[in-house]
Structure formats: C-alpha cells, structure tokens
Amino acid sequence: MQFSFVFRSLIRTFTPQNAKTKKKNMRKIIVTVAPVCHVGKVIPADVKNPLTPEEIAEDTINCYKAGACEVHLHTRDLQGNPTFELDVFRKTIGLIRQETDMIVQGSTGGLSTLTLAERCVSLDVPEVEVASLNMGSVNFGETVYVNTMPDLRYWAKRLDETSTVPEMELFDLSHVECATRLADEGVIHRPMHYNFCVGPGNSSNLSATGRNLAMLCSLMEPNTSWGITHDSMQDFSMLACAIGMGASAVRVGFEDSFYYAEGKRAHTNAELVERLVALIRMMGCEPATPDEARAMQHIIKK
C-alpha cells in the first residue's frame, strides 16, 4: 500500500502538466537574432548571408522556429549595401509576420556618415516595436562612431513619437552614465533595458571580459534589465558568462559572428540560435516567447 502511494506520487510529479508548470516558472532569456552581415564583412563561401526580403524573412522564420523571439533587422540591396527604401523594410517585415509573432527591432545606428533621419528611418514602419539607441560616441578601430548628445535626444524624441521602446546600446562605461542623464532629463523613460556591446579586443570599445561585464553591471540603476552583444565572438563563453551574471537577453547572428565555438562556424543563423538555445537550457533557463519578451521589455504590441 505504501509503495503504491509513493509510486502514484512519482507519476504525478512527472506528468506533462507538472513539466509544463516547471518550464513556465523557469527564468526566461530573450534570444535576439541579427541575421544580416555588416557592410564590408568578409563572408565565407559556405555561409549564406541573406540579402533579399524573401531570404531575410525565410532566415528569420527559421530562427524563430529554433527559439529566437526578436529580430534586429537591417535591409540591404542586392550588392549588400544598406537600403533606406521603406518598401523593402515593410515587405521584409510583412513576410516575417506571416508566420511569426516575433518582435521587430529597428535601429537608430548605422554609419556615422548618414543623416540623423536616415539613421532612424526604420521608425517610420509601424511594426517596429523596439529600436537600438546608442548611448554615445566610441572609437571603432581607427575611426570614431559618432553619436553626440544632441543626436541622442533627436533619436529619443523620434522613438517617443512613434511609441517605439529604446534598447540602450552601451559600448563604454561612460555610456551607463549617459543613459541615466537622459532618463533624468525625461528624454527616455524608466525602466530601461541596456544592451552591453563588447568587442573583440582589437577595436577600441570595451573588450569582452567578465571583468568588464562586472564593471558595467556595477554602474546599473536598480530595476534595469540588460543583455549582451559580443561582436566578432569566437565562441559562446561570454554569452554564458552574461547569463550566469543575470542577463535577460543575448544576441547571435551573422551581423555579430559566424562562430559558436573555437574553430567551429555555423552555416546558417538558425544553427547559431539552436546552439544558443541549447546553452540556455543547459544553464537551467528557457528561451522567452515573443509575448514574454514584450512583457520583460515593457513593450506594448503594435
């Protein structure tokens, strides 16, 4: 009788319903994919960099099926150069939205040589729910990526006008202070979501080390969430470090890197997402759904 009671209890413990409840209560991680390579990036022959709206949409949909809930979207012409034609952007989003409910993230970044309006043209597309907002200028190699305070206020105003949530891109320790200053001015709204952008070490922004992540985290305001983008990463070690330190968002994709482990290159963006999702689950977490990610970032669905 006692054995039967214990056995029934064990069966109840491992029912699909209990497994579903456990999964629901696990810590959620936002998985963002940035599928399109930087302009001028050397692309290996065995890597397919999506360029057309159809290619980008198909690639993004495959990433969604692999566990991504958000796409950081850039569009290109057939030569791989940036295009500011909103029809191309709208078509790409329309194809993505036919099969997914992913969050679409636009940008106020781009090249310093662009006008302020060109750098935030994606905000004119209603489906864009969140957009990157750089928190200051930074040296990139031998050049300067220019983002002045007046520039930031201009883009923040456009974000507010279009009801688009900013993701603060921080390339340096001082950028944390800049975000606080803009929030104090009322230019951006609290609670904020930071994206710590760390580099390969041969650029002049912060290199990708646990020490630098710890310093960035030490400067954060209370009730602020954060994520990581590791440019030119050779493996997922810094992404794992960030998750372990409390990051709520991580990003992969050909814009950042082709690699998931030392000497091991992905052939598709979906492969990067699949391997990242496996890492997240190994660390006792679960990839967020699009609606869970919206709630985590205080996004009102458009």
Image: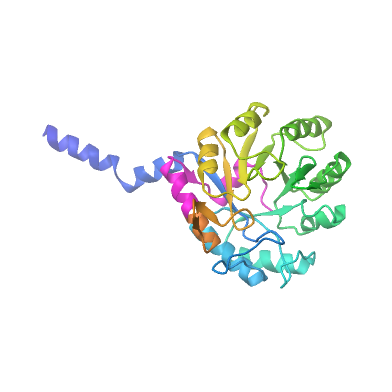
Is 87 drawn above or below residue 207 in the view shown? below
Residue 124: percent from the left, percent from the top? 80, 58
Q: In the shown orientation, is residue 81 left or right of residue 13?
A: right
Observer-nearest of 210 and 66: 210
Observer-nearest of 192 and 203: 203
Residue at the image point whose x is 55% and y is 38% from the top: 242
The answer to whether any part of residue 67 appears in the image is no
Q: In the shown orientation, is residue 222 left or right of residue 277?
A: right
Residue 224: percent from the left, percent from the top? 65, 33
* On-image quarter of the C terminus: bottom right
Q: In the shown orientation, is residue 49 left or right of residue 178?
A: left
Residue at the image point whose x is 54% and y is 41% from the top: 238
* On-image quarter of the N terminus: top left
Residue at the outermost left position: 1
Quadrant of residue 150 within the rendered picture: top right
Residue at the image point whose x is 67% and y is 71% from the top: 52
The answer to whether any part of residue 104 appears in the image is yes
Residue 156 inside the magenta-drawn segment: no
Q: Which residues are magenta?
A: 275-302
Residue 299: percent from the left, percent from the top? 67, 45
